[in-house]
Image: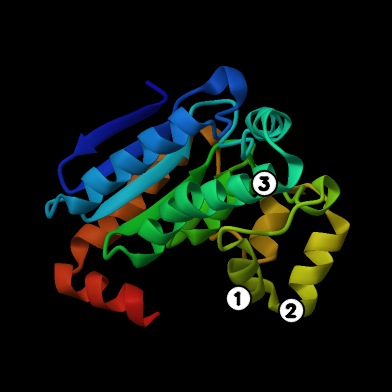
């Protein structure tokens, strides 16, 4: 399996678990993740979910080899449209689930986060980062758009000009730079990442269930 789920009472840790490929978002991984998140979100006992990756990376983003293969097997125009629909349906479904859920999602960035993997992290309600984390805004250099909610998340955090500058520069950001920009809330020692994520789950657990369930959509 490419996704590992660890239930822990009122919380769950969901790990992208294909480290040899830096947790690249292949079709099997994405579908397994989607099923896993649907299941934990449907569990009324689970009030918070930690989303992380198996070391050394959080996620290298979408599987470009898979997309290239799809394009080469189809007429270019038709293939591009099919890939766009797949991205919207599969990648977008994960982002919509995180954003629309009453459950609090905590992204724990353990390493490099790029593309759609980064988009999912930015969609989470809290983002914390290991000192080894790297934000990789590679969209523009690959001729891609900041899709799957990235444009919305960046303009909310950075404003229009800040978001456009981020896109045009395409520079890697270390964890501290990302924190200064407001992309992550906390930077911690790598070995403490999941422990600190668990502390955020404790904060959720300390509040009445209706409070977080109603505050998230309001905010």
Q: Mark 1 points at which residue?
A: 156
Judged from the image, the secondary structure of the residue bearing numbered disc 3 is helix
Residue 71 at what x, y percent from top left?
Answer: 70, 35
Mark 2, other Cα within 10 Å: few <14 / some 14–19 / many ≥20 = some
Q: Earlier in the sequence, mark 2 or mark 3?
A: 3
Image point (61%, 61%), residue name: 150
Do the CB atoms of the residues marked 2 and 1 lie less than 8 Å apart? no
Q: Horizontal placement of 40 versus 155: left or right?
A: left
Whole-Å distance between the Cαs marked 2 and 3? 33 Å
Question: To which quarter of the image does residue 154 belong?
Answer: bottom right
Residue at far left of view: 45
Q: Horizontal placement of 185 versus 106: left or right?
A: right
Looking at the image, residue 61 lies above or below residue 139: above
Image point (69%, 65%), residue name: 181
Q: How many labels does the image show?
A: 3
Question: To which quarter of the image does residue 57 belong?
Answer: top right
Residue 215 at what x, y percent from top left?
Answer: 30, 77
Q: Name the residue under label 3.
A: 78
Q: Earlier in the sequence, mark 1 or mark 3?
A: 3
Image point (21%, 36%), residue name: 7
């Amino acid at each position: 399996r490419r996704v590992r789920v660890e239930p822990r009472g009122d919380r769950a840790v969901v790990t992208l678990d294909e480290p040899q490929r830096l947790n690249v978002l292949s079709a099997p991984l994405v579908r397994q993740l989607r099923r896993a998140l649907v299941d934990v979100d449907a569990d009324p006992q689970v009030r918070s979910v930690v989303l992380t990756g198996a070391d050394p990376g959080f996620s290298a983003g979408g599987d470009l080899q898979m997309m290239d293969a799809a394009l080469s097997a189809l007429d270019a125009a038709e293939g591009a449209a099919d890939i766009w629909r797949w991205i919207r349906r599969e990648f977008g479904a994960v982002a919509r689930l995180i954003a629309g859920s009453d459950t609090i999602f905590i992204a724990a960035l353990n390493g490099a986060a790029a593309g759609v993997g980064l988009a999912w992290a930015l969609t989470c309600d809290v983002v914390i980062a290991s000192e080894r984390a790297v934000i990789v805004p590679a969209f523009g250099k690959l001729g891609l758009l900041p899709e799957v909610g990235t444009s919305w998340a960046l303009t909310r955090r950075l404003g229009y000009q800040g978001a456009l500058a981020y896109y045009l520069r395409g520079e890697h950001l270390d964890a501290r730079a990302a924190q200064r920009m407001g992309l992550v809330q906390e930077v911690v020692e790598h070995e403490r990442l999941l422990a600190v994520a668990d502390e955020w789950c404790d904060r959720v657990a300390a509040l009445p269930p209706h409070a977080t369930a109603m505050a998230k959509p309001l905010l």
